[in-house]
Image (cartoon, helix red, strand yellow):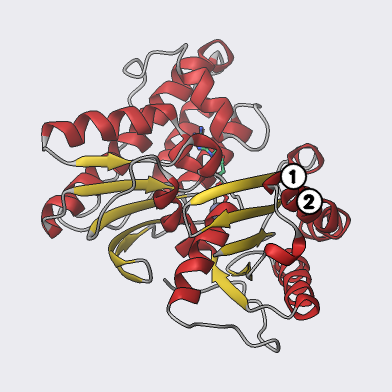
């Protein structure tokens, strides 16, 4: 079954063509980072306008690159939420119109669920049940996943998301938006042990997170150390080590508690080199296997939307043409 996926929940306009939920025939992502960089964060109104300009060319490019014709597509899946309403509306409405004009089924997809399903786009996908750490710009949660469409939320952030903390610390250090990749690179030049930032494990037996304390500790360090500019690599490394320690500790502990042998980390922060390495080495010590999507499928993309659409369609699920987008949702 050939699924066309469409994603426009934030600042990426993306389209992908995926066969049978795993075989990516094409995946096109048009990023608006350049536009929002100047403002230090995503400007919702600018994002939705840019999606309107991008959506048709991005979808056409994805279909062209897939080697398929429009008539070969069996289903259209698009992100329904959570995300920025104006941005979501562009991709979701385009997808509805596309499905209606081609007379094919349409499926609205939860963006968070799609991130979790990006684990099945790895070369070595996990088997059920597994524990998933979803760490992105808007969410940081741990799930116990028992099927393509069933999840139990084990814990989540009580304040900032991990990606949000990266973005805020990057701003404090004058490194711009978005911050994850920049800090990831800079941290390699620093010493992770020279400045020790707080690690809020909260209850060590529970799986909630808190990242605003780490961010505040970095801010306090900057304010009290006028010479901090010559230490930015050490600050980046120390901050990153604190975040990565907490994330890897919690996901491994969650897997042990649920007696799951498989772990996945997904979402934009899963692109982080240190997080990938740390979770892999700690999991190996406990005989757990780790499945992490390739870096280009950690951030927002439409291949994960198409893959999730496939599993819902398999279950006979369809979304009504009068369905609306949603900005927030529990998963
Ligand atoms: O999943 P995503 O692309 O969008 C959301 O759904 O939020 O995640 C974006 C977040 C941003 O906060 C960005 O700074 C972070 O992921 N990120 C990273 C890295 N690459 C992106 N964080 C840490 N290390 C990275 N290499
Ligand atoms: Zn995302």
Q: Secondary structure at mark 1?
A: strand
> Is 173 rendered above or below residue 246?
above
* Quarter, ligand 1: top right
Give the foreground label among 2 and 1.
Answer: 2
**Do we see residue 204 in this rendering?**
no
> From the viewer's perspective, is 152 left or right of 163?
left
> From the viewer's perspective, is 53 left or right of 100?
right
Locate the N terminus by quadrant.
Answer: bottom right
Q: Is mark 1 within 8 Å of ligand 1?
A: no
Q: Residues within 10 Å of mark 2 (few under 14, many from 20)?
A: many
> Is 65 rendered above or below residue 3?
above
Residue 83: percent from the left, percent from the top?
62, 64
> From the viewer's perspective, is 211 left or right of 143?
right
Name the N-terminal-most of marks 2 and 1: 1
- Look at mark 1 in the image and give the residue it sits on: 30
Residue at (48, 24) in percent of width and height: 236
Residue at (41, 43) in percent of width and height: 122
> Is 301 rendered above or below residue 170?
below
Residue 35: percent from the left, percent from the top?
81, 41
Q: Residues within 10 Å of mark 1 (few under 14, many from 20)?
A: some
- Look at mark 2 in the image and give the residue it sits on: 58
Q: CA distance from mark 2 to mark 1?
A: 7 Å
Residue in front for this viewpoint, 150 or 196 = 150
Residue 40: percent from the left, percent from the top?
72, 41
**Do we see residue 188 in this rendering?**
yes
**Contact between labelled residues 1 and 2, with CB atoms less than 8 Å apart:** yes
């Amino acid at each position: 079954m050939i699924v066309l996926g469409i994603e426009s929940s934030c600042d990426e306009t993306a389209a992908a063509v995926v066969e049978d939920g795993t075989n990516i025939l094409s995946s096109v992502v048009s990023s608006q980072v350049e536009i929002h960089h100047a403002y230090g964060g995503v400007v919702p109104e600018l994002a939705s306008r840019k999606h309107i300009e991008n959506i048709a060319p991005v979808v056409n490019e994805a279909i062209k690159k897939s080697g398929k014709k429009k008539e070969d597509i069996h289903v259209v899946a698009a992100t329904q939420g959570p995300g920025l309403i104006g941005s979501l509306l562009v991709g979701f409405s385009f997808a509805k119109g596309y499905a209606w004009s081609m007379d094919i089924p349409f499926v609205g997809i939860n963006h968070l669920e799609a991130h979790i399903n990006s684990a099945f786009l790895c070369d070595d996908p996990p088997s059920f049940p597994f524990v998933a750490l979803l760490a992105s710009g808007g969410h940081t949660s741990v799930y116990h996943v028992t099927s393509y469409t069933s999840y139990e939320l084990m814990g989540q952030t009580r304040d900032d998301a991990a990606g949000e903390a990266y973005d805020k610390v990057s701003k404090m250090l004058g490194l711009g938006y978005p911050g994850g990749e920049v800090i990831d690179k800079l941290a390699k030049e620093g010493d992770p042990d020279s400045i020790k930032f707080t690690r809020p494990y909260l209850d060590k037996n529970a799986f909630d997170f808190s990242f605003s304390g780490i961010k505040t500790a970095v801010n306090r360090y900057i304010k009290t150390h006028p010479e901090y500019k010559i230490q930015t690599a050490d600050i980046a490394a120390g901050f990153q080590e604190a975040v990565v320690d907490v994330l890897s500790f919690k996901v491994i502990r969650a897997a042990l508690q649920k007696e799951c042998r498989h772990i996945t980390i997904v979402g934009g922060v899963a692109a982080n080199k240190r997080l990938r390495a740390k979770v892999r080495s700690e999991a190996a010590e406990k005989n757990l296997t780790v499945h992490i999507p390739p870096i280009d499928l950690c951030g927002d993309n439409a291949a994960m939307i198409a893959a999730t659409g496939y599993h819902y369609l398999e279950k006979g699920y369809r979304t009504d043409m009068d369905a609306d987008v949603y900005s927030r949702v529990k998963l």
